[in-house]
Amino acid sequence: MIIKILMVGSFAIVFGSLSLIVWTVFSKGLPALSLDMITKIPEGGFYMGGEGGILNAILGSFLLAIGGTFLAILFSLPTALFLEVFSKSSAWCSYVRLSLDILWGIPSIVYGAFGFIIMLSVGLRASLLGGIITLALLEIPIMTRAMDEIIRQTPKNLTQAALALGVTKFELAYQIIIRQTFPALITAILLAFGRGIGDAASVLFTAGYTDRIPNSLFRPVASLPLAIFFQLSVPFPEVQQRAYASALILTIIVLLVSVVSRLVASRMNRFTIK
C-alpha cells in the first residue's frame, strides 16, 4: 500500500510539473507566435522590438543537433557493440560503463568549457563545427549507454543460435544484433538528439551566435536556447514575449521528437524477434 501511494504521488508530481511547464510555455508563447517568427531572420532592431523572426536559430539548432548526433553515432554504436559482443566478459567493460555514467552526469557547461579549450588549442573560432563537436561529446555518453542497455536485451537464444551456425562476431554485431535492436536504437538516437537540440550551455562558448544563417562550418551559428536567453535578457516586454514564443517552438520540436521515436519503435517492433 505504501509503495502504491509513493508511485501515485511520484506520477502526480511528474505529470503535474510537465503540465505546468507546457501550459506556461503555451499560454505565454502562443499569443506572440506568428509566421514571421518562423520564416524570417532578425532584422534591424529585433532585440529592441523591431521586425524579424528566429529562422536563424531554428535552422541553427537543427544543424547543430543533426551534426552532433551523426558524429555521436559514429562513436557510440561501435562502442556499444564492442562492449556487449566483442569484449563482454572483460573487466575493462565495467570501467568503460562507469566512465560513461560519470560523463553522462557532468553538466553541459563543463563540456562547453572543455570544447572551448580544445578549440583554442587548435585555433578554431566559435563556429558551427565547434558546436557540432561539443554536442557530439555531450551526446556520446547518453547514446552509448542507451545503446548498450538496448543491445544487452537481445535474446540470448538468437545470439547463441547464430554463433552455433558459424557466424563471426562481426557478422553477429552488424547483421543480426543491429537489425534486431534497430527500432530501440532509433529511440536512443532520438533521445540524444532531443538532448542536443535543447542544450544551451555546451554551445554558448563553442558555436557563438549570429543573426544570419551560416554558410560554412567555420561560421558562428545561432540556436534556439540561446535565442530564448538573449530575448529574455532584454528589458522590453515585446521581446520577452517573443522569448516565450521561441520556447514554445523548441518545446514543440522536442515533443515531436519524442512522439516520432515512440511511433518508429512501435511500428518497427513487429520486425524483431521476441
Image (cartoon, rainbow, N blue to C red):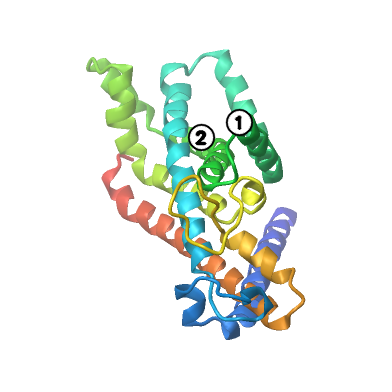
Across and down, in percent, residue 228 comes to 64, 66
Quick check: 26 above or below 256? Answer: below
State the residue at coordinates (44%, 22%).
82
Quick check: 46 above or below 253? Answer: below
Among all residues in the image, which is located at the extreme front?
Answer: 44
Mark 2 nearby-residue class (10 Å; few <14, some 14–19, many ≥20)? many
- Looking at the image, do the residues carrying marks 2 and 1 touch, with CB atoms under 8 Å apart? yes
State the residue at coordinates (46%, 53%).
63
The amino acid type found where label 1 is placed reads Leu
Q: Would residue 130 appear left or right of 183 to someone viewing this image?
A: right
Q: Which residue in the structure is indicated by mark 2?
A: 144
Across and down, in percent, residue 250 comes to 55, 65
**Which residue is at the front of the view, 217 or 157?**
217
Q: Would residue 233 appear left or right of 123 to someone viewing this image?
A: right
Among all residues in the image, which is located at the extreme left?
Answer: 165
3D distance between C-alphas at marks 2 and 1: 8 Å
